[in-house]
Amino acid sequence: MTPLFQSASDLFETVEAALDDDFTKAVIERQSPTTVPDSYLRDMRSGQVTQLTHNVDYTPENHALMGQLRAAKVKRIADDYPETEIVGDADADVCVLSWGSTWAAIHAAVQRQRRDGNKLAWIHLTHLNPLPKDFPKDTERVTCTFFYNETPPR
């Protein structure tokens, strides 16, 4: 799977709006623990970024604290998740990870592969951020499924 774009490791960026059907230009919001959110125009092909807003934080220490408190609050959401159900073989070589409306298609594909003798495990998530606390971390290979606009990627 090819990511749409990847932000720098010291920044948090979210796509706010695609500006064309080909997703070649988008408005993104960028922030970090030490800066306030600002909007940018990103050319997805070249990676060029043009700042659209110039927000000023008059209390940067408060912004950092609020960011930390929000991150901790989001992380605590996982405390209320139900236990993650792993379907399939306990000794599977591959774990298929799916979410959203892909459930039926992935369920059928995993069962078909298991009937053909392939060892597979499958996890269908309902929450992606944060990931469940009991999410397996010892799987060698994880395959993620992604369907966009009801058309599978090629």
Image: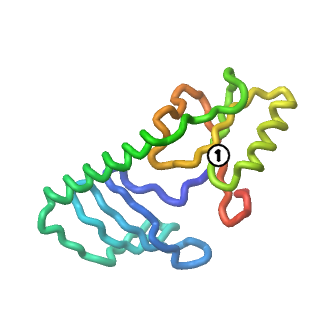
Q: Does 44 sit left or right of 8 as displayed?
A: right
| Image quadrant containing the C terminus | bottom right
Residue farthest along the top direction in this orientation: 91
Q: Which colour scheme is used?
A: rainbow
Position above or below: 101 against 134: below
Identified at 23% across, 56% down, the residue is: 66
Instruction: Kindly indicate the quadrant of the structure image that contains residue 31.
Output: bottom left
Q: What element carries label 1?
A: strand
- Viewer-proximal residue among 54 and 129: 129
Identified at 48% across, 67% down, the residue is: 46
Amino acid beneath label 1: Ser
Task: Sort mark 1 into few (<14), some (14-19) or many (20+) by Cα contacts within 10 Å.
Answer: many
Identified at 53% across, 48% down, the residue is: 127
Residue 90 x, y percent position in the rendering: 67, 22
Instruction: Kindly indicate the quadrant of the structure image that contains residue 115.
Output: top right
Position above or below: 57 against 102: below
Residue 48 x, y percent position in the rendering: 41, 69
Task: Give the total of numbered labels.
Answer: 1
Residue farthest along the right direction in this orientation: 116
Q: Does 114 sit left or right of 17 as displayed?
A: right
- Viewer-proximal residue among 150 and 85: 85
Residue 141 x, y percent position in the rendering: 61, 32
Q: Does 95 sit left or right of 84 as displayed?
A: right
Instruction: Kindly indicate the quadrant of the structure image that contains residue 54.
Output: bottom left
- Viewer-proximal residue among 149 and 103: 103
* Residue bearing mark 1: 98
Residue 95 x, y percent position in the rendering: 65, 34
Identified at 33% across, 49% down, the residue is: 73
